[in-house]
């Protein structure tokens, strides 16, 4: 308890250091250039305050957030479902794996171009581009996880007559949690990048669209404000939703679901063997 | 006495490699059979055949048990579940009410001397404690036939003997039928009512020793058992 105190207080402000460094560098660079090229942090905050006072800003923010959450949710659902199927069925794996690898190698901009041609402006292209670019990441990762499941644990489940639902819930999903959350974090980062790109290039709503508008009008301070909001949105979803879920569900050696720190056996406290009921006294053997 | 499992002329191969060659033996109700043989001879395959986890190539297996409990060589506990949750896992369907299920698991863990350790994860327990959780899990399904595949192989001699003696009491208490696979002759003699000695792969039942009524006190063997021990060890060394 005593030695964890200084560690905790150090960890409390350490994460601020890189942020402060970026702000300092940003401000230093802003002094070298006119605000129309590089507005400083204060000008950006002022622009952000101005945006925040307008109802339109919230409409654009909600549109992008809605597209991001729905697209990411769809990609996770499809990716996990497809990954589980591919992991269990060798023929499905052999069929889909090369296709998914191919899909991950198509640049997002190519998808956006095709989707704009096929679907026109609106919610379609941003949503679909998120789904087609992130589903393969999740599916390949989950399929690999299923293929690496410990067969000894599955045999144990069979021997004890566990039903398919119990096996999925208590053995397969916890075993896959590590890979799935890693894929989800990667997919979430990807979601915002391709979503804003799709909105920037061919949409009539959303933060990406507004960013493109700011570029056309040379409102550099507003462009910076929108970039800040986009980054903040992704951070809020990651740290407000995904990381707490990961902390709740993900198991990894030495850290169990819901635990913030490693169990104390890692600090060298290994439990001694408690006496066996009705057994020989310790001294006899 | 009724046989719970009878094997007649059982053959089994893996990828054209013969593992079991014409095994004939039975396991009678209420007895503990020790299966002894050199490493890799097919003891575990024979055990899995008895428990209906493995299929045979030819021969006949008659199984008359109602429910089998299995203790594996490795504990096979889920690392993301506590001791209590690991045991409770096999009771999800049999005891749907959570409170009643946990009450039963508390009792089982107490029987294997692990009361107070319910909320510990496998990584927080020693090797012997993990195997005790695995034993509690096997007992949870109320088996009339218990299969144990070298469950104490990784433990040191003293702990192994204490675990064997504890297991013996546990088996006697419930008048349970069990098959215990080991390559350790002393373990087999301390625990078994009969000892089936298998040859090197492909395994054949070389000799079946009747150990009932022989004098033994814990891990100490009487003169006749020591004689059998010498015979079995000589046979193993000859393989």
Image: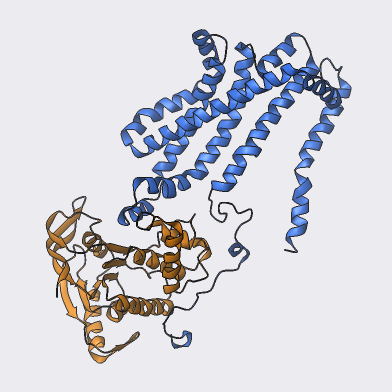
Residue B64, compared with residue A200, is above or below; it is below
Residue at horizontal 43 percent and vertical 79 percent from the top: A277
> Is residue A277 in view from this perspective?
yes
The chain painted orange is: B
> Is residue A109 in view from this perspective?
no
Q: Quadrant of residue B2?
A: bottom left
* Between A162 and A224, the one nearer to me in the picture: A162
* Between B144 and A193, the one nearer to me in the picture: B144
Q: Quadrant of residue B92?
A: bottom left
Residue B127, percent from left and from top: 46, 68
Residue at horizontal 71 percent and vertical 11 percent from the top: A213
Looking at the image, residue A228 sits to the left or right of residue B8; the answer is right
Looking at the image, residue B49 sits to the left or right of residue B149; the answer is left
Q: How many marks?
A: 0
Q: Quadrant of the N terminus of chain A?
A: bottom right
Residue A106, percent from left and from top: 50, 20
The chain painted blue is: A
Residue at horizontal 62 percent and vertical 18 percent from the top: A197
Looking at the image, residue A14 sits to the left or right of residue A273; the answer is right
């Amino acid at each position: 308890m005593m030695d964890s105190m200084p560690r905790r207080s150090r960890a409390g402000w350490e994460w601020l250091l890189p942020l402060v460094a970026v702000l300092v560098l940003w401000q230093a660079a802003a002094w070298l250039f006119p605000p129309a090229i590089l507005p400083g942090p204060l000008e950006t905050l002022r622009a952000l305050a101005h945006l925040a006072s307008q109802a339109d800003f919230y409409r654009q923010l909600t549109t992008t957030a809605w597209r991001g959450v729905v697209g990411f949710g769809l990609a996770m659902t499809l990716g996990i479902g497809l990954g589980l199927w591919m992991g269990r069925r060798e023929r499905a794996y052999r069929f889909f794996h090369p296709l998914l690898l191919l899909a991950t190698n198509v640049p997002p901009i190519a998808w956006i171009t095709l989707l704009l041609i096929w679907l026109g402006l609106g919610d379609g292209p941003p949503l679909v581009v998120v789904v087609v670019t992130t589903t393969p990441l999740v599916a390949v990762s989950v399929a690999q996880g299923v293929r690496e499941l410990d067969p000894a644990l599955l045999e144990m489940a069979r021997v004890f007559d566990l039903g398919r639902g119990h096996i999925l819930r208590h053995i397969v999903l916890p075993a896959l949690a590590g890979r799935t959350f890693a894929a989800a974090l990667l997919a979430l980062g990807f979601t915002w990048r391709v979503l804003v790109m799709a909105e920037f290039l061919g949409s009539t709503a959303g933060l990406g669209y507004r960013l493109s508008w700011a570029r056309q009008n040379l409102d550099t301070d507003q462009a910076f404000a929108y970039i800040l909001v986009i980054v903040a949105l992704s951070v809020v979803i990651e740290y407000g939703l995904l990381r707490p879920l990961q902390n709740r569900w993900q198991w990894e050696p030495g850290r169990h679901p819901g635990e913030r720190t490693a169990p104390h056996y890692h600090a060298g406290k290994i439990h001694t063997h408690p006496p066996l009921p009705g057994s020989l006294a310790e001294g006899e053997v | 006495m009724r046989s719970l499992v009878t094997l007649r002329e059982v053959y089994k191969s893996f990828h054209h490699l013969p593992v079991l060659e014409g095994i004939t033996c039975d396991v009678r109700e209420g007895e503990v059979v020790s299966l002894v043989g050199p490493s890799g001879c097919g003891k575990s395959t024979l055990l899995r055949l008895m428990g209906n986890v493995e299929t045979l190539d030819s021969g006949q297996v008659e199984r008359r048990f109602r429910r089998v409990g299995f203790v594996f060589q490795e504990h096979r506990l889920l690392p993301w579940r506590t001791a209590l949750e690991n045991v409770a896992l096999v009771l999800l369907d049999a005891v749907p009410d959570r409170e009643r299920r946990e009450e039963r698991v508390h009792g089982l863990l107490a029987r294997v001397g692990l009361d107070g350790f319910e909320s510990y994860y496998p990584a927080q327990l020693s090797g012997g404690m993990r195997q005790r959780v695995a034993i509690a899990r096997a007992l949870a399904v109320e088996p009339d036939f218990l299969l144990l595949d070298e469950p104490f192989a990784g433990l040191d001699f003293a702990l192994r003997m204490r675990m064997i003696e504890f297991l013996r009491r546990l088996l006697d208490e419930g008048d349970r039928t069990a098959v215990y696979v080991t390559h350790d002759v002393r373990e087999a003699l301390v625990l078994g009512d009969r000892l089936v000695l298998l040859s090197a792969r492909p395994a054949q039942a070389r000799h079946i020793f009747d150990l009932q009524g022989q004098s033994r006190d814990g891990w100490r063997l009487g003169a006749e058992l020591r004689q059998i021990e010498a015979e079995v060890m000589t046979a193993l060394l000859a393989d």
